[in-house]
Image (tube, rainbow, N blue to C red):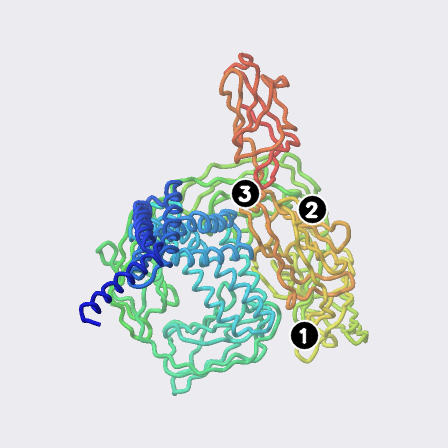
């Protein structure tokens, strides 16, 4: 075949082949064009989303949703069509679809983020805010808090995916910031709540060392709870709604802390934690739990010098208010220097729950290099427009150097221990700058120049006095404090007779009593006696008006009655309902005091002594085994009999305490008497010893279910003796029950109903109830060492009262209350000008009571009186309006 023919045949073959390809796949050629169109549409729809997801208005509108759905559908269609292609054209178009889908994802992240913060995050924030506003932390609060924390973390991840810093900032500065505000409002309160639950579990498990470390963490959390709020308010001064104070929650936490601390201390074996020198004149002995102030004294400690220095004499000691720190201080002119052995004698000191503190010995090395500083400056009125200023230093001084007041040199007077200096007779109503240059402590440390300032004011208010009479006792209640000089000035007499002697009542310098029995002159009463108080002066020298009252003076013919008894170490403590004359309790013989003991083994012991027992009368005595309390708290109602003497040795064990067991005691009649000579009748009673006591099995629970806001019930595990009605054996939120509290048995002697005074609970919240030292009918004692403090949640019991009535127009009068009230309007009587009327209606709106009349029937000059008697109007805590009458 010729070359020309071959070439011709080849050309034909190529053309046929080409036409064969077209003929065999006509759809692919058409698809490429269609796919291109689909991709362009996807790109166009994806780009159109930009105006939405770049917008910081944080809104997912209907237009946005429609545009998103359109773009998503376009992209899915383009993806499906591109998938049918092959080769480079497929790769190119796939990349363009992926870029369009990336723009769609920006919109998707925007939609997801906005919906998440506006729904999930906002709901979690509101849930926690609701708990905070309720003013209480519970396990549910913790759960809600943890949910918000988790939601915040998720929100941060969701927001982090959103395109555009402006949009992210908008989300962060609104919803997320509010969520963090809500969380930080209680972040440290929730931490405290959880930590205290953990501590309680550790105490129950005996993990006391771990619990002690966690108490330190708790202290840090308490500080941070305050700091975070102060810092937050400073950072956002324009946001008054954030970082709030939470008084109800704080009260709940502190009540819980008191309870868990009490259980921790009860579980501890009392011990000395440390001894350290504060400065050259003071050592601090730290106990791990509160110790009984009547058992600790400086004599219990031996301080031995180890390097030839002189032995210190005249050491004094004092116990801190919380009972956990005992301070040993040197006498004037002496100081600690170099090494000493400090030893506490074994069992010399007891904790407040009656447990012995073990022996403790340590060596301290004192090197005082710290100069003295001024700790405070105070003033007292000195009369005639003058005041006395007292400046206190933190330690004893060897020399004060130079003292000047407002630039002029002065010579102050010093206390015996050289820790305080006094500037006497300076003008009241002025400010003073006090400078001290060259002060040295007893160790020779020279202080830099010290200064303090104080502003004084003059007292120009004259004192007044209220006089009351009970039988033959006159009581004087002054409006302000009086001092010894004032006592010598004011005079009390009856019917112009000789001056009577006033006696200060305990430690209160504003209350005095006067025994007026001498004016009866053998009679049993004196009617219409004129009691006059004259020459009344206050501390500043202001003279009050003379006061004269008329009252009946009646001879006291009521003998003291026996109330209760307890044991303390080797002593028997008797309580009466009024003061006992000290002279009649000085010596009690075997004939006056019959005692029988049945010990823990059932063996009976009888007192056979013929010697007298030492007995004294005291003011205040803690019948829970903690000995003498404030000697100025009340009258001398207690008689303390010391049995650890020759006559009572049969009852004393090897440790010097009363033998464990049950005692039957009879006090003979006429042995004791009151100040008026009324003799005490014979009385027989039973009391358990304190050496180890008989069975300690009584437990209790507390609740206020179904009770009034000012009541709670203590339910004991068995029938109780009458000392379960002794208010002194109960504490509420760590303090004694208030005056006016009543305790009664209800249903049985297992249930004690405690009724608090009206208005005592001012804030809703939980409070701990602790009972100690109560005795069952069979002699069993409540065991304070194992009993867990009970928690009762109270509502405030401040009773609302009607304050004013105002006629607002000719058809309406409005009663305003001390707080908002609501409820039915029964139990209300309305009078106009003294005549009872039936108003058109009574309505309760916005916490006030509206008394509605027919228009024109009420004049602005009318007198409207509203009486509440059994009204059911109540505040939000359910306290009903106080029965009262109010007029305009």
The span from disc 1 to disc 2 (Cα, nearest Å) is: 39 Å
Q: Which residue is outermost to the front?
A: 1
For the residue labelled by badge 3, is the local secondary structure a helix, a strand or a loop? strand
The residue positioned 59% from the left and 77% from the top of the image is 347
Instruction: Find residue 657 and name its label.
Output: 1
Q: Nearer the viewer, mark 1 or mark 3?
A: 1
For the residue labelled by badge 1, is the local secondary structure a helix, a strand or a loop? loop
* Residue 258 point in image, percent of width and height: 54, 60
Left or right of 786, for residue 219? left
Q: Which residue is mark 3?
A: 492
Residue nearest the viewer, comparing 83 with 323: 83
The span from disc 3 to disc 2 (Cα, nearest Å) is: 20 Å
Q: Nearer the viewer, mark 3 or mark 2?
A: 2
Q: Quadrant of the N terminus?
A: bottom left
The residue positioned 37% from the left and 40% from the top of the image is 63
* Residue 187 point in image, percent of width and height: 44, 57
Q: Which residue is mark 2?
A: 556
Q: Is residue 796 above or below residue 222?
A: above
Residue 563 appears in the rendering: yes
Q: Is residue 555 above or below residue 781?
A: above
Q: Nearer the viewer, mark 1 or mark 2?
A: 1
Q: Which is more N-terminal, label 3 or label 1?
A: 3
The span from disc 1 to disc 3 (Cα, nearest Å) is: 48 Å
> Which of the 4 quarters of the picture holds residue 876?
top right
CB under 8 Å between callouts 1 and 2?
Answer: no
Residue nearest the viewer, comparing 356 with 76: 76
């Amino acid at each position: 075949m010729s070359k020309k023919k071959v070439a011709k045949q080849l050309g034909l073959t190529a053309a046929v082949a080409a036409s064969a390809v077209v003929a065999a796949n006509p759809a692919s050629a058409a698809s490429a064009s269609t796919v291109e169109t689909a991709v362009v549409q996807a790109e166009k729809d994806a780009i159109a989303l930009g105006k939405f997801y770049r917008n910081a208005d944080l809104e997912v509108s209907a237009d946005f949703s429609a545009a998103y759905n359109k773009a998503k559908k376009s992209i899915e269609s383009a993806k499906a069509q591109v998938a049918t292609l092959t080769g480079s054209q497929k790769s190119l178009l796939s990349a363009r679809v992926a870029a369009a889908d990336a723009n769609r994802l920006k919109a998707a992240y925007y939609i997801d983020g906005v919906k998440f913060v506006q729904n999930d995050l906002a709901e979690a924030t509101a849930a926690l805010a609701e708990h905070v506003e309720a003013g209480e932390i519970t396990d549910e609060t913790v759960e809600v808090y943890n949910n918000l924390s988790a939601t915040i973390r998720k929100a941060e991840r969701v927001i982090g995916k959103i395109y555009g810093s402006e949009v992210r900032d908008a989300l962060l500065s609104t919803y997320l910031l509010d969520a963090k505000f809500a969380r930080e409002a209680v972040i440290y309160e929730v931490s405290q709540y959880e930590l205290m639950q953990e501590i309680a579990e550790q105490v129950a498990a005996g993990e006391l060392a771990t619990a002690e470390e966690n108490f330190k963490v708790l202290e840090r959390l308490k500080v941070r709870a305050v700091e975070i709020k102060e810092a937050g308010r400073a950072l956002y001064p324009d946001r008054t709604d954030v970082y709030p104070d939470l008084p109800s929650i704080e009260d709940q936490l502190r009540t819980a802390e008191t309870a868990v601390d009490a259980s921790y201390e009860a579980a501890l074996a009392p011990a000395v934690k440390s001894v350290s020198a504060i400065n050259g004149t003071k050592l601090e002995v730290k106990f791990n739990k509160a110790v009984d102030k009547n058992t600790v004294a400086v004599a219990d400690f031996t301080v031995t010098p180890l390097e030839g220095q002189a032995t210190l004499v005249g050491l004094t000691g004092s116990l801190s208010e919380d009972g956990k720190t005992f301070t040993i201080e040197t006498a004037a002119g002496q100081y600690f220097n170099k090494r000493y052995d400090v030893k506490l004698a074994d069992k010399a000191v007891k904790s407040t729950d009656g447990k012995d503190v073990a022996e403790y010995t340590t060596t301290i090395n004192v090197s005082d290099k710290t100069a003295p500083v001024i700790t405070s400056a105070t003033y007292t009125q000195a009369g005639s427009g003058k005041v006395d200023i007292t400046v206190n230093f933190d330690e004893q001084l060897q020399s004060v150097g130079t003292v000047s007041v407002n630039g002029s040199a002065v010579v102050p007077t010093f206390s015996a221990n050289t820790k305080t200096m006094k500037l006497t007779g300076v003008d009241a109503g002025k400010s003073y700058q006090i400078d001290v240059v060259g002060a040295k402590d007893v160790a020779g440390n020279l202080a830099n120049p010290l200064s303090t300032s104080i502003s004084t004011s003059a007292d120009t208010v004259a004192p007044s006095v209220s006089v009351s009479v009970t039988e033959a006792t006159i009581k004087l209640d002054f409006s302000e404090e009086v001092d010894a000089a004032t006592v010598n000035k004011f005079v009390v007499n009856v019917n112009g007779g000789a001056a009577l002697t006033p006696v200060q009542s305990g430690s209160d310098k504003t209350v005095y009593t006067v025994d007026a029995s001498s004016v009866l002159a053998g009679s049993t009463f004196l009617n219409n006696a004129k009691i006059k108080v004259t020459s009344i002066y206050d501390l500043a020298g202001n003279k009050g008006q003379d006061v004269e009252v008329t009252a009946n003076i009646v001879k006291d013919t009521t003998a003291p009655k026996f109330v209760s008894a307890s044991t303390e170490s080797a002593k028997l403590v008797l309580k009466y309902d009024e003061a006992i004359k000290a002279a009649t309790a000085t010596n009690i013989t075997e004939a006056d005091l019959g005692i029988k003991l049945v010990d823990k083994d059932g063996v009976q012991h009888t007192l056979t002594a013929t010697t007298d027992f030492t007995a004294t009368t005291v003011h205040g005595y803690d019948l829970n085994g903690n000995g003498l309390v404030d000697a100025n708290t009340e009258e001398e109602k207690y008689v303390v009999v010391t049995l650890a003497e020759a006559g009572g040795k049969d009852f004393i064990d090897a440790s010097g305490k009363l033998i464990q067991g049950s005692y039957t005691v009879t006090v003979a009649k006429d042995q004791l008497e009151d100040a008026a000579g009324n003799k005490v009748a014979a009385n027989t009673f039973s009391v358990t010893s304190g050496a180890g006591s008989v069975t300690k099995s009584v437990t209790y629970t507390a609740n206020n279910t179904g009770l009034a806001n000012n009541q709670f019930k203590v339910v004991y595990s068995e029938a109780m003796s009458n000392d379960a009605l002794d208010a002194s054996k109960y504490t509420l939120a760590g303090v004694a029950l208030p005056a006016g509290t009543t305790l009664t048995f209800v249903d049985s002697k297992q249930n004690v109903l405690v009724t608090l005074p009206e208005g005592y609970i001012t804030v809703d919240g939980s409070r701990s109830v602790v009972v100690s030292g109560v005795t069952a009918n069979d002699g069993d004692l409540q065991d304070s060492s194992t009993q867990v403090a009970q928690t009762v949640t109270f509502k405030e019991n401040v009773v609302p009262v009607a304050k004013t009535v105002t006629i607002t127009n000719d058809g309406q009068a409005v009663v305003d209350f001390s707080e908002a009230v609501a409820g039915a309007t029964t139990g209300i009587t309305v009078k106009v000008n003294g005549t009872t009327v039936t108003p058109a209606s009574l309505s309760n709106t916005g916490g006030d009571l509206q008394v509605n009349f027919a228009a024109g029937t009420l004049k602005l000059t009318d007198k409207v009186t509203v009486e509440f008697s059994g009204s059911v109007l109540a505040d939000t805590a359910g306290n009903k309006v106080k029965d009262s009458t109010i007029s305009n």
